[in-house]
Image (tube, rainbow, N blue to C red):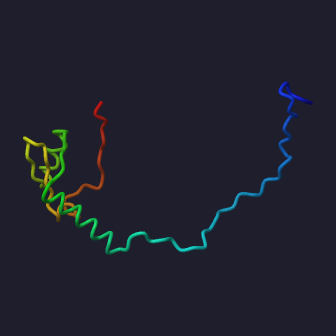
Amino acid sequence: MTRRSGREKRVVSAIRQLPFSRLVNPCAPIEVLSADHVKAIIYAALTILETRGMRFLEGGGRRLLCAGGAESDETTRMMQFDRGWRLGYGAAGEWHLEARD
């Protein structure tokens, strides 16, 4: 039977499909950065957060961070974090995000 376009009707079983199987990559993953490089990037980021800080526009977020031990400058809305705070004893394990609009 032909369609209006002139093509014949496709037969579903015309191409035999192989059964699904999990693929295994025999090659080891490529490490783009060594562990020392990753550690250096993390410590550089912590230095920036400690010396320069990060701007938080939401007042509620600034209050929560101040309650957790971060330093706040309300005129610029910048928050500065102690290096140890971020490395574990002050950071929350779960955050609630809200859209601004």
> x, y percentage for residue 95?
29, 48
Give the left or right position of residue 87, taking residue 8 as reference: left
- Extreme residue in the front direction: 6
- The residue at the point 32 percent across, 75 percent down is 36
Depth check: give the residue in front, 16 or 19.
16
Total marks shown come to 0
Q: Quadrant of residue 24?
A: bottom right
Give the left or right position of residue 16, taking residue 71 as reference: right
Depth check: give the residue in front, 24 or 34.
34
Give the left or right position of residue 5, taking residue 29 as reference: right
- The residue at the point 19 percent across, 44 percent down is 56
Depth check: give the residue in front, 97 or 7.
7
Q: Quadrant of the C terminus?
A: top left
Residue 78 sits above or below residue 90 on the image = above
> x, y percentage for residue 77?
13, 43
Q: Quadrant of the N terminus?
A: top right
- Extreme residue in the top direction: 4
Residue 13 sits above or below residue 4 on the image = below
- The residue at the point 17 percent across, 40 percent down is 60
Residue 60 sits above or below residue 81 on the image = above
- The residue at the point 29 percent across, 70 percent down is 39
Residue 69 sits above or below residue 35 on the image = above
Depth check: give the residue in front, 79 or 84.
79
> x, y percentage for residue 97?
30, 42
